[in-house]
Amino acid sequence: MGSFGTNTSSTTSFTLTGFPEMEDLQHWLAALLLLLYAVSILGNILILFIIEEQSLHQPMYYFLSLLSVNDLGVSFSTLPTVLAALCFHAPETAFDACLTQMFFIHLFSWTESGILLAMSFDRYVAICNPLRYSSVLTDIRVAHMGISIVIRSFCMVFPLPFLLKRLPFCKANVLTHSYCLHPDLIRLPCGDTTINSMYGLFIVISAFGVDSVLILLSYVLILRSVLAIASQEERLKTLNTCVSHICAVLIFYVPMVSVSMVHRFGKHAPEYVHKLMSLVYLFVPPMLNPIIYSIKTKEIRKRLHKMFFKPKL
């Protein structure tokens, strides 16, 4: 691909590999991914359509609509190269296009973490300070929280493409996934990637690490408040309002932590293990979130029932 002195100006493209070790199953894998995309996109659009109803204009549903928009962003940011690599056998992607995709994938990942933290704060206020709920989570404050989450994510991810563009790329520019991720890209430069690695670790700890600790703390306080309720029936009823959010947190953080662990400690694992873990991390949360909230949230469930099972006149 060039000498050690080659810089990014002569690096025109990357090759996305997909799953060459599963060549016999490529058609089935492509069909599965298309199904996941369809469920994710239709499910999140449906959630947004339902939340348009005036009776659902409440902080909890504002955060849920923000989560659905973000999940649509995750799906659409990976869709072009996944379709090109697996369905149309066009694995080449331009250098700048790859960096742009990487930026948006990580932007939406960091944003989702922030949204889940905001949703945990919503549950904390609703359960621990119910009388102050409407005064604490006003529409303006919810809007400010949403804007702050997006700005924080943007500021964290913005340096990544520039830190990569300064490096010389002289190895074969072959990526291990059918989309561009920062941990995958920093394996390719010939120059010193210490700054990239350290900055990547810093934003992971300062975003995912801090967010997960604060979410855990909010649920410790929620649990303490719930245990103070005398009636067991009321305890279960109160905890049931948190089930959807707890599931959303688990399906986001468990795959994300697993991907990180496999990347750092499972270097001798087969290549397809890394790829499958990344697929789970990027594809499963956007698909499952609308399903979980549709099943576990009474108001959304009632609205869905009215939409699909209208009473006959």
Image: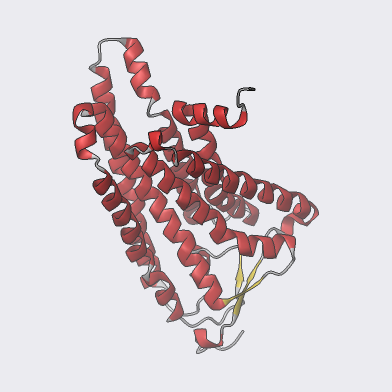
Q: Is residue 177 visible?
A: no
Q: Quadrant of residue 90?
A: bottom right
Asked if residue 23 lies left or right of residue 59, the reply is right
Q: Nearer the viewer, residue 92 or 134?
A: 134
Image point 54% across, 46% down: which residue? 45
Q: Residue 166: x and y, percent?
A: 42, 81
Q: Nearer the viewer, residue 176 or 124?
A: 124
Q: Nearer the viewer, residue 290 or 17?
A: 290
Q: Residue 101: x and y, percent?
A: 52, 66
Asked if residue 167 lies left or right of residue 93, the reply is left
Q: Nearer the viewer, residue 264 or 29?
A: 29
In the rendered picture of this protein, how many numbered marks are placed on residues? 0
Image point 54% across, 39% down: which residue? 288
Image point 30% across, 42% down: which residue? 213
Q: Residue 133: x and y, percent?
A: 23, 33
Q: Quadrant of residue 119?
A: top left
Image point 48% across, 31% down: which residue? 300
Q: Is residue 142 visible?
A: yes
Q: Residue 150: x and y, percent?
A: 35, 57
Most extreme residue toward the right is: 24
Judge whether 161 appears above or below 240 on screen: below
Q: If the image is split into quadrants, where does the N terminus sit?
A: bottom right
